[in-house]
Image (cartoon, grey):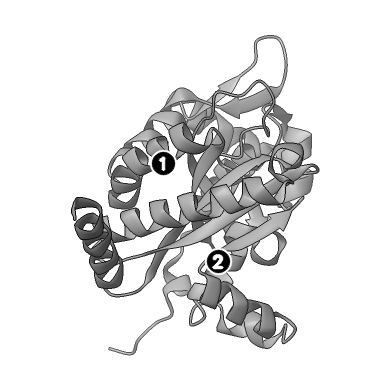
Amino acid sequence: MPSRDKDSYCIRSVENALLLLEALAEEDPRCSLSQLSKRLGMTKASLFRLMATFESHGYVERNQGSSEYKLGLSAFEVGQKLLSRMTLLNKARPVMEQLVRSCNETVYLVVQRDQDALFIAESNADQKVKIVSLVGRRFPLESCAAGKIFLAFDTQNNKERLENNPQLSGAIKEWQQEGVSLDYNGVGDGSTCIAVPLLDNENHLAGCLSLVGPSFRMADEQTRQQLLPAIKAAGEMISAKLGHLNFQLKSETTALQTNA
């Protein structure tokens, strides 16, 4: 039997439904059929039928007395079930919370989604002034420290992107050697973001750990020097939990030195 490209098996109606859900997740909390029709290039009649189906299953809710829609609780439940079953998040969560307690800045777990860095979970700092939550937000890889970690430590999957941007090559070597990336304003005006890689037992990049806070609290050189070792140590601890041998050895060596 001749092989077929996986796209040839796509069911158009299902694909449209999934595109609609993604658009609802990325738009404002409430949006109308007119907005979605312009964005997706689909007729209002088609969108209305899809919305009615989603609404009957709780994936979409319609605001009383208006034609505006938003994601429903069923979508939230599915997302929470996915996160609860993620090995990476389960192993990272305790270390993230420990890092927040030591640094008092918000910490995120980030994965690559297509050509973007997707912030999927956070541990919040107890600060009166902090950057608005980034959970569910996506940023182009080149635009923020977290995305640059994926460019530096997952060069195979980002090969084409790197070839089209040769200016990144020098910076990538620095990120690889230092094991950390730092940026200003990459995830919002007045923000500072520090990110480190999380490697698994096969030396593959599983995700990255990112510490984000207002630049006025992190602009001081001494502050950065305190934060960098802390987030690096946290990244190494999570990588060790994922079975990365080099980080396991580092952790064991540190433990022996501490006990000596």
Image location (x, y in percent) of residue 11: 46, 59
- Residues at circles 2 and 1 in contact by the CB criterion of under 8 Å: no
Q: Amino acid at mark 1?
A: Met
Quarter occupied by the N terminus: bottom left
Tell me the quarter of the picture where residue 104 sits.
top right
Q: Residue at x 65, y 59 (%)?
A: 182
Answer yes or no: is residue 201 visible.
Answer: no
Q: Residue at x 61, y 77 (%)?
A: 174
Identify the element where label 2 is drawn: helix
Mark 1 or mark 2, which is nearer the start of the sequence?
1
Image location (x, y in percent) of residue 165: 72, 82
- Badge 2: few (under 14), some or many (20 or more) residues near its Cα, within 10 Å? many
Q: Amino acid at mark 2?
A: Ile
Image location (x, y in percent) of residue 258: 25, 52
Identify the element where label 1 is drawn: helix
Q: Nearer the viewer, residue 29 or 168?
A: 168
Q: Which mark is residue 96?
A: 1
Q: Nearer the viewer, residue 74 or 66?
A: 74
Q: Residue at x 66, y 20 (%)?
A: 128
Q: Is residue 82 above or below residue 88?
A: above
* Residue underneath mark 2: 149
- Badge 1: few (under 14), some or many (20 or more) residues near its Cα, within 10 Å? many
